[in-house]
Image (cartoon, rainbow, N blue to C red):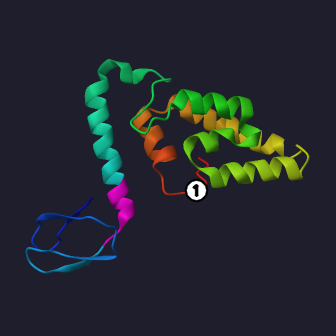
Amino acid sequence: MYIHNCPECGKQYSTQEKVNRVKCPYCGAETNVSYADQDQQTANQQWRQYASQAGDALDSVFNNGPSGKSRGVAGLLALLMGALGLHYFYLGKSTAGIVFLIIFFLSCGILGVVTQVISVIQAVLFFTSSQQEFEQKWVYCPSNFPLF
């Protein structure tokens, strides 16, 4: 279900499918729809629900967020196997993981040093960010290849 806000009358309504244009059932106004905003709203709603249930346990690096991803696990994968891009596969960004694998194997590991340095920087960012920042920047972001 996808929730829409009418810019004309201000009322909320929903559709069952993703469509490019929606028509408000209350006032009849037609609007173009951007689902990137919708996905971000869904992520924020999931986060609020998760944070209210988790309470103090939310501070641990190895706790899973609402997406089921742990910034601690992602950070360890980036530190230990970052040249291979395994942390990207864990985060669901398989395009970036495949790029890292190709760079590593085609260069016989020589450019693996570059990808490992990038991964170490990312690991530091994983460990130092809050769980919500981690989820928004690395898990729910629309980019297939988030770097920093």
The residue under the point 34% across, 76% down is 20
Total marks placed: 1
Which quadrant: the N terminus? bottom left
Across and down, in percent, residue 85 comes to 70, 43
Question: Is 99 left, or right, of 2 in this rendering?
Answer: right
Question: In which image quadrant can residue 80 be found?
Answer: top right
Tell me the magenta residue range. Answer: 33-39
Question: Is 28 left, or right, of 123 in this rendering?
Answer: left
The residue under the point 75% across, 41% down is 84
Across and down, in percent, residue 18 comes to 34, 68
The kind of secondary structure the magenta stretch mainly shows is helix
Q: Residue furthest front?
A: 16
Q: 114 or 97, which is in the foreground?
A: 97
The residue under the point 54% across, 57% down is 143
Across and down, in percent, residue 50 comes to 31, 33
| Residue 74 position (above or below residue 23) | above
Q: Residues within 10 Å of mark 1 (few under 14, many from 20)?
A: some
Residue topped by disc 1: 144
The residue under the point 56% across, 46% down is 92
| Residue 60 position (above or below residue 1) | above
Question: What secondary structure is marked by label 1?
Answer: loop
Taking the magenta stretch, the answer to whether it contains residue 104 is no
Question: In which image quadrant can residue 11 be found?
Answer: bottom left
Residue type, numbered disc 1: Asn
Q: 42 or 127, which is in the foreground?
A: 42
Question: Is 111 left, or right, of 4 in this rendering?
Answer: right
Q: 121 or 138, which is in the foreground?
A: 138
| Residue 14 position (above or below residue 84) | below
Across and down, in percent, residue 25 comes to 12, 74
